[in-house]
Image: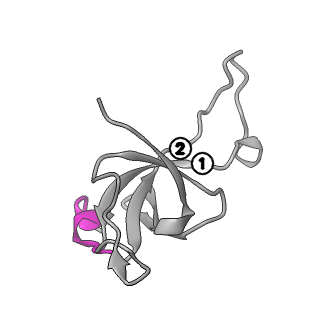
C-alpha cells in the first residue's frame, strides 16, 4: 500500500478511524519488554471521523476532531495494518475518553 493510503479511509456513521499509538519498548527502569509482555495499546490518534452517531433520533456531534488522542477498550475495534502501521476502526461507544487539545 502507498504511504498515504490511510487518507482514503472514510468510516461509516458512528465510527472513527484511528492510528494506534504503540506501547513503549522499555519500562521507566530501562527493562526491555518482549512483544508478548507489552501491554495492549489503549490510546490512538484520530485519523478520520464518520458522520456523527445518532442517539434518540438526533445526531450527536463528535466531542473531538481529527488529530485528537482517544482512549479505548483494549480489545475493541477492527484492526488494519497499512504501510507498516496499525489502525483501528472503532465504534463511538468504544471510546472511553479523549485528551483535550490546548
Residue under numbered circle 2: 22
Does residue 8 appear to the left or right of 93 in the view shown?
left
Give the percent coordinates (x, y) of residue 28.
66, 18
Q: Find out whether residue 6 is within the magenta segment.
A: yes
Q: Which of 26 and 92 is in front in this view?
A: 92
Q: Nearer the viewer, residue 40 or 54?
A: 54
Q: Find out whether residue 67 is within the magenta segment.
A: no
The image quadrant of residue 33 is: top right
Does residue 5 appear to the left or right of 72 in the view shown?
left
Disc 1 residue crowd, few under 14, some 14–19, many 20+, Cα 10 Å: some
Assess whether mark 1 and mark 2 are in contact (beta carbons under 8 angstroms): yes
Identify the magenta region. Answer: 2-11
The C terminus is located in which quarter? top left
> Residue 41: which numbered mark, if any?
1
The kind of secondary structure element at disc 1 is: loop
Q: Can residue 59 be seen in this view?
A: yes
> Residue 15: which numbered mark, if any?
none
Point 39% across, 66% down: residue:
16
Mark 2 or mark 1, which has the lower sequence index? 2
Amino acid at each position: 500500500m502507498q504511504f498515504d493510503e490511510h487518507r482514503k479511509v472514510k468510516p461509516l456513521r458512528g465510527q472513527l478511524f484511528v492510528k494506534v499509538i504503540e506501547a513503549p519498548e522499555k519500562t521507566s527502569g530501562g527493562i526491555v519488554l518482549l512483544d508478548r509482555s507489552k501491554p495492549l495499546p489503549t490510546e490512538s490518534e484520530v485519523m478520520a471521523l464518520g458522520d456523527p452517531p445518532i442517539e434518540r433520533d438526533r445526531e450527536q456531534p463528535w466531542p473531538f476532531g481529527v488529530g485528537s488522542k482517544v482512549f479505548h477498550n483494549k480489545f475493541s475495534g477492527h484492526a488494519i495494518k497499512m504501510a507498516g502501521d496499525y489502525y483501528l476502526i472503532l465504534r463511538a461507544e468504544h471510546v472511553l475518553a479523549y485528551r483535550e487539545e490546548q
